[in-house]
């Protein structure tokens, strides 16, 4: 994706500052632009789905390259007056009633509202080859990538409590599924029965590395030296919201009930525990796919606009009441 840096100064101030230029942040920016709000989107240039060949399950955008989706989204935001700024946010704070974000360049951007759309970081198992093949033939979500590996030999690398669940899920896309216990204990008898009923093989022993030849996954190498041919490997990453830079504002993160990571706690319409700060997309919902993140951003953008409208109404009511005697306020019948 080509980038064009938008000039700005330390005095730039907007109705809303959005940190994160993925599907969720851009969708929120689009909605807010259409609400005639001034919006700045700060994009660190690290989209989670960058390694993937295409976006899937997104109606009208099926198979589109992630970079192309973002390029189109940027253009749509800018067509409504939004500003997209390439840069890393290194600090956040308050300046009176406004929120501030400081970029790596030292520049500061202020906004009446702050929206966190920074996504999450995938923590991958420490097995040689996993990170290099991530998003290609090392996968985690059958709904995102199952079709692309249908009817192939798929290995499930067990590293946590969701391994059996993943194996049973991927069985929908292929009859050739192998569960490698790796660092996990032997599943309970009930789980073993389910795996056997679905024809899923269970292999004990650690996986030492992936076997890759000519830039293609060929299989996994076990601790005893045995090689098992495979076309794809499924892992269970840890999912942790990119939230560290907002800690100074008091934005709360909580552990996910699955034990697979942490996310920013939100209430109705994405509002965080800090008044004036919202969170959307994978930062607030670890399981959201691209389409869900975009929808989340659109709705939350509308809710942020409602919040700003309420502030403006209260301001104008106060001004009206201070300038108009109570006995002179009346409704004129038409």
Image (spheres, rainbow, N blue to C red):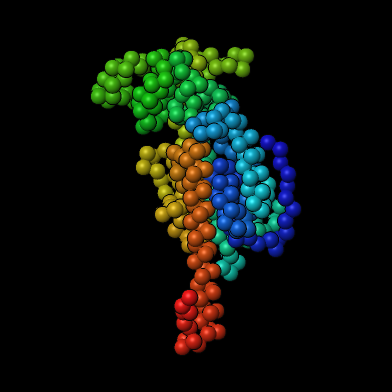
Q: Find residue 84 and report its horizontal and vertical position in percent.
A: 66, 49
Compare residues 41 and 209 and report the one nearer the observer: 41
Compare residues 86 and 125 and report the one nearer the observer: 86
- Please report the residue visible at 51 percent of the width from the left and 54 percent of the height from the top: 302
* Total numbered labels placed on residues in the image: 0
Compare residues 27 and 179 and report the one nearer the observer: 27
Q: Find residue 320 and report its horizontal and vertical position in percent.
A: 53, 79
Q: Is residue 193 visible?
A: yes
Name the quarter where the N terminus is drawn: top right
Q: Find residue 307 and report its horizontal and vertical position in percent.
A: 49, 62
- Asked if residue 288 is positioned above or below residue 106 in the image, the reply reads above
Q: Find residue 198 and report its horizontal and vertical position in percent.
A: 32, 17
- Please report the residue visible at 53 percent of the width from the left and 22 percent of the height from the top: 137
Residue furthest left in the image: 190
- Asked if residue 144 is positioned above or below residue 76 in the image, the reply reads above
67 sits to left or right of 161: right
16 sits to left or right of 162: right
- Please report the residue visible at 46 percent of the width from the left and 82 percent of the height from the top: 330
Q: Is residue 89 visible?
A: no
- Asked if residue 35 is positioned above or below residue 323 in the image, the reply reads above
């Amino acid at each position: 994706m080509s980038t064009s840096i938008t000039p700005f100064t330390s005095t730039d101030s907007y109705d809303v500052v959005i940190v994160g230029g993925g599907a969720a942040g851009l969708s929120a920016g689009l909605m807010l632009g259409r609400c005639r709000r001034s919006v700045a989107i700060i994009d660190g240039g690290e989209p989670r789905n960058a390694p993937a060949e295409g976006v899937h399950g997104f109606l009208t955008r099926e198979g589109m390259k992630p970079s192309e989706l973002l390029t189109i989204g940027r253009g749509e935001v800018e067509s409504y007056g939004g500003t997209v700024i390439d840069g890393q946010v290194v600090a956040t704070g308050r300046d009176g009633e406004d929120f501030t974000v400081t970029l790596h360049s030292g520049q500061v951007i202020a906004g009446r509202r702050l929206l966190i759309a920074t996504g999450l970081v995938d923590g991958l198992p420490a097995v040689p080859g996993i990170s290099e093949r991530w998003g290609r033939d090392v996968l985690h979500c059958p709904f995102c990538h199952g079709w692309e590996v249908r009817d192939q030999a798929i290995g499930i690398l067990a590293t946590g409590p969701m391994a059996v669940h993943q194996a049973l899920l991927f069985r929908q896309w292929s009859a050739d599924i192998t569960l490698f216990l790796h660092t996990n204990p032997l599943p309970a008898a009930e789980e073993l029965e389910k795996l056997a009923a679905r024809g899923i093989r269970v292999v004990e022993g650690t996986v030492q590395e992936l076997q890759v030849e000519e830039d293609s996954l060929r299989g996994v190498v076990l601790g005893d030296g045995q090689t098992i041919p495979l076309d794809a490997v499924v892992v269970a990453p840890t999912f942790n919201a990119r939230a560290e830079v907002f800690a100074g504002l008091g934005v709360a993160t909580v552990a996910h009930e699955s034990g697979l990571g942490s996310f920013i706690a939100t209430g109705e319409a994405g509002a965080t525990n800090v008044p004036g700060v919202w969170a959307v997309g994978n930062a607030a919902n670890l399981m959201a796919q691209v389409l869900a993140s975009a929808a989340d951003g659109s709705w939350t953008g509308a809710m942020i606009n409602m919040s700003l409208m309420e502030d403006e109404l209260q301001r104008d009511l106060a001004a009206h009441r201070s300038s108009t005697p109570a006995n002179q306020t009346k409704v004129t019948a038409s």
